[in-house]
């Protein structure tokens, strides 16, 4: 999961940098980063109670998120 962690960290830092850069213009900047979503990438931690329990304990709703269905 290092790639996922790096990309989320990058978005968080970019957001902070944009907040500072655009504050004088009165522009507000926000970012949204999903938590743990039920996907093939998270199948391993989902099926391993030793990993799933601590993850879900720090998840506000205490469950895996569900991704949106693709729209055709």
Image (cartoon, rainbow, N blue to C red):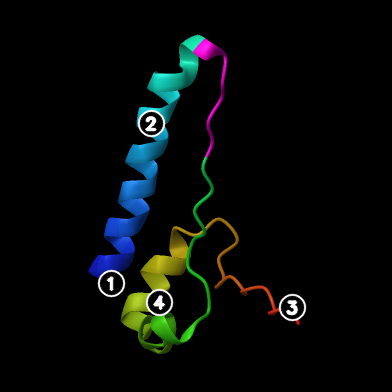
> Disc 3 and disc 2: Cα gap in Å?
32 Å
Give the answer, above or below, for where 19 lies relative to 36: above
Q: Residues within 10 Å of mark 1 (few under 14, many from 20)?
A: few
Labels 3 & 1 near each other (Cβ < 8 A): no
Left or right of 72, for residue 51 = left
Q: How far is disc 1 from disc 4 in space, using C-alphas?
A: 14 Å
3 or 2: tag closer to the N-terminus: 2
Secondary structure under badge 2?
helix
Which residue matches tag 4?
52
Q: Could you tell me how far apart the alpha carbons at marks 2 and 4 are, in whole angstroms?
A: 30 Å
In this picture, is 5 found above or below 17? below
Give the residue at mark 2. 16
Q: Position of residue 46 (x, y in %)?
A: 43, 83
Report, in whole angstroms, how far the alpha carbon at label 3 lies from the one at label 1. Answer: 27 Å
Q: Please state the extent of the stretch shown in magenta in the rendering.
A: 25-30
From the image, tell me which residue sits under label 3.
71
In this figure, which residue is indicated by the disc labeled 1? 1
Where on the picture, by quarter, is residue 71? Answer: bottom right
């Amino acid at each position: 999961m290092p790639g996922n962690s790096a990309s989320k960290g990058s978005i968080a830092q970019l957001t902070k940098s944009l907040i500072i850069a655009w504050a004088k213009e009165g522009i507000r900047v926000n970012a949204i980063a999903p938590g743990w979503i039920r996907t093939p990438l998270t199948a391993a931690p989902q099926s391993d109670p030793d990993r799933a329990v601590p993850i879900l304990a720090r998840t506000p709703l205490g469950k895996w998120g569900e991704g949106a269905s693709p729209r055709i």
